[in-house]
Image (spheres, grey):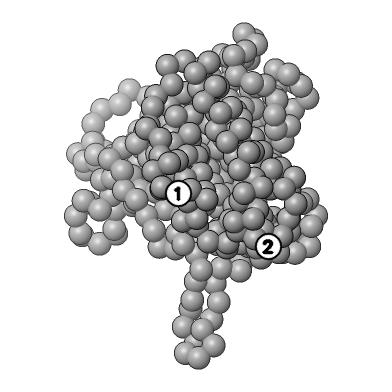
Amino acid sequence: MASLRTASAAKLLRTATTSSARPALSSMTAQQRRFKSDTVVEVNKEFARAMPSGGESSVPAVRRPNDNGPDYAAHIDKATSTFTPVPKQVQDGSEDVNVLPAAVLSGAPMELQARTVRIFQPAKPATQSGNWGSHHWRMDWDVLAKGHRWENPLMGWQSSGDMMQGTHMNFKTKEDAVAFAEKQGYEYFVQEPQARKFTPKAYANNFLYTPNKLKHIRTK
Amino acid sequence: MAVTPTQFAKTTAQSANWDVAKRRVLAAYREWIRAAPEIQTMYSIPFPVSVIRTRMREEFERHRFVNKIPVVDVLLMQNNAEYQETMNFWKQTTHVMSYFPEENFRGHERLPKTFMQGFLEGRN
């Protein structure tokens, strides 16, 4: 699924029912693929379930023809700078999520909705430290590529105009983090943690009887 | 300009249904439209009244598709705060002028219009 979040998947569905000219699942650009969420299975299911039924009819259909690409006609606000990324979609209160559309009311800069946050569970450190640091889910912001950082001309320090630099937020569960991102209108993607593979082994198992093949071919 | 600041104060209210909400929004819109000439003279805005009215309309159009009544209520409350601040001259000219993007940095060019323009500028 090329979409980053369920709300935009719902929008995708709406346009698909009206125009049905959108190759939704297969065609995505390399950049979008990079930000692909690991947990899109239920989105795909929703998509497949709602497709034959014709989608929701109560919501106002097709307002943005280009739902997953950058919205170049987005409403800009005072905080929009020259290097602000172009948002895919700016919350306007018509989203059919259950939570309050906070971006409509909070007055937060539109730029926040143009940036993609990552929701992940921090990995356990490779040292013998405890795993408390990886028990929560974390949302963080990627650094901006260009324009928001410069070198201080006097001392050579790195300066930044990026308001979210180094910011992260911790959540108890993944669902909390996703709900927060949807409420705030953030683009997000979820990185599932890598599960640790553990196979119990015993030397004695090498000598257990098996009917078919020998476990070890011994040469003497 | 108002004589007493409480002249534009309004009690926060919840709309019972969409009809009430719509009526309140229209009333707020009419208030703004009526106030446009006064805002122009008060803040010495170098635009004709029609431009100011268009900009007011744009602010209302931004929230055209809001589909939750509580959100409309909060927007109305924020709207009235803005109106009160404007009409009581609690704002300064820069605050009003910042609604007009041409007056800000790069004006309408702040976001690229097309993919190619953004690409050539090295933006994403």
Residue visible at 25% across and 53% down in the picture: A133
Q: Is residue A199 left or right of residue A83?
A: left
Locate the N terminus of chain A and report the quarter of the image it occupies: top right
Real-space Cα distance between discs 2 and 1? 31 Å
Quarter assignment of residue A178: top left
Residue visible at 26% across and 28% down in the picture: A209
Judged by depth in the image, the label closer to the viewer, 2 or 1, is 1
Instruction: Estimate the x, y position of residue B62 in percent, counting from the top left.
Output: 61, 37
Instruction: Estimate the x, y position of residue A219 in percent, counting from the top left.
Output: 36, 46
Q: Secondary structure at mark 1?
A: loop
Residue visible at 61% across and 43% down in the picture: B35
The furthest residue to the bottom: A154
Q: Which of the chains bears the disc numbered 2?
A: B
Instruction: Estimate the x, y position of residue A142 in percent, counting from the top left.
Output: 49, 57
- Residue A1 visible: no
Residue visible at 52% across and 50% down in the picture: B1
| Above-or-below relation of A152 to A144 | below
What is the crowding at mark 2: few (fewer than 14 residues within 10 Å), some, or many (at least 20)?
few
- Residue A64 visible: yes
Q: Amino acid at mark 1?
A: Val
Q: Nearer the viewer, residue A104 or A43?
A: A104
Q: Amino acid at mark 2?
A: Glu
The furthest residue to the top: A53
Residue B103 is marked as: 2
| Above-or-below relation of B26 to A84 | above
Q: Which of the chains bears the disc numbered 1?
A: B
Instruction: Estimate the x, y position of residue B81 in percent, counting from the top left.
Output: 45, 43
